[in-house]
Amino acid sequence: MNQRLGLAGQEPVSPLYDVIIIGGGPAGLSAAIYAARKVLKTVVISEDIGGQVTWTYDVNNYLGFSQIETADLVAKFEEHVEKYGVEKLIGVGATVLELTGKIKKVTTADGKGYLAKTVIIATGKRPRPLDVPGEKELVGRGVTYCSTCDAPLFADLDVAVAGGGNSALGAVIDLMKVAKKVYTISLTPLTGDQILQDKVMGSPKVEVFTEYKIQRIVGESAVEGMEIASMKTGEVKRLDVQGVIVEIGLLPNSEMVIDTLKTNSIGEIVVDSRCHTGVSGVFACGDVTDVPFKQVIVAAGEGAKAALAAYDYIISQR
């Protein structure tokens, strides 16, 4: 039987699903709703619910909501999925994907295996690290990647923000409300929207260092400072800060499929207009793909497309 299914080894360890959705953000949850509406046996496997959208406090550009707090929007997403009784495995991530056979196998971190006719990958992105000495050691001890989550922790403290784009400037603006002093360190001139630049540059709390490289983060049990070096002169400065917020971009969570699926130069999964990856029965959607414009509403739409494409694939195999 395993040979007919394109699998080797032990007997199947789970029921055969029509679709396994990997990821619980807007793309994955939208895919779950559309799969359920097509009466596909579906399971969502994800370490959490909400994905990247939970890194922000509110959303102001999702159709139907002029402004909604992120927690409320995610709750509405989850409530909608619950309405269809979709099976969910939350708190355990997928670790191994076997995608080339007729039947796909997904193994989770707890060693359990799940079989499906199709797989939808909606794993999103994660923060890009600085990769400097002291960063890993002080994560959660003053080093963070989410100003919305952690800005209140830096009330009346001196804080540095790494980055010069919209996300970094947004973090600076968040911190301006609570911190005593905010340093902005960017390898390049600021690249964020002019309206954000104006707010940042107009604050007496903010000091901007452009064309500076962060060399290391200093501290034993907590952040005590950082060293930065001028890209022009090589001059090294010490900034006495108690927090570092890293906002230098995102990396796609595509490691599991990097050797199986086609990816672009930055690791995003390449898909066509129907979210197909090029491997039969395997679809991808949301920020992990090369689809432009990383927005919540775009991810939700792509999730819907992926589920409908998976349904078309399944019925074509009968």
Image (spheres, helix red, strand yellow):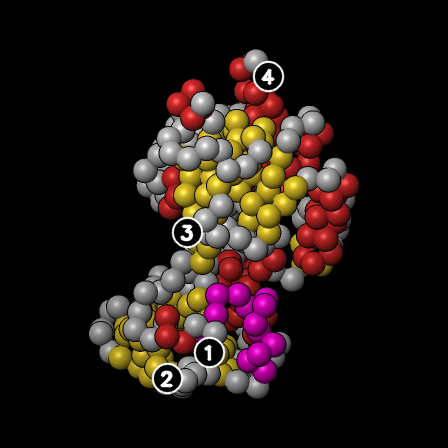
Task: State the image quarter where residue 215 is shown.
Answer: bottom left
Disc 3 and disc 4: Cα gap in Å? 34 Å
Magenta-drawn segment: 143-155
In the image, what residue occupies the spot 56% across and 72% down? 150
In this view of the protein, which residue sits in the foreground, 99 or 147? Answer: 99
Towards the viewer: 225 or 281: 281
Task: From the image, tell me which residue sits under label 4.
Answer: 315
Q: Are marks 2 and 3 in contact (CB under 8 Å)?
A: no
Give coordinates of residue 9: x percent, y percent.
38, 34
Q: Is residue 147 magenta?
A: yes
Quadrant housing residue 239: bottom left
* Of pointers 2 and 4, the one earlier in the residue sequence: 2
Camera-near label (3 vs 4) is 4
* Residue 137 image offset from top left, x and y in percent: 37, 75
x%, y% of residue 14?
54, 37
Q: Are the residues at dot 2 and dot 1 in contact (C-beta closer than 8 Å)?
A: yes
Q: SS class of the residue under badge 4?
A: helix
Q: Which residue is mark 1?
A: 141
Residue tagged by mark 3? 251
Above or below for 23 versus 271 = below
**Residue for point 57% across, 20% down:** 314
Q: Nearer the viewer, mark 4 or mark 1?
A: 4
Question: For the residue labelled by badge 2, is the local secondary structure a helix, a strand or a loop?
Answer: loop
The quadrant the N terminus occupies is top left
Q: CA distance from mark 2 to mark 3?
A: 27 Å
Report the amino acid beneath label 4: Ile
Q: Nearer the viewer, residue 72 or 168?
A: 72
According to the picture, the residue beneath numbered tag 2 turns out to be: 219
Find the distance from the CA under tag 3 to the CA under tag 1: 23 Å
Front of the two marks 2 and 4 = 4
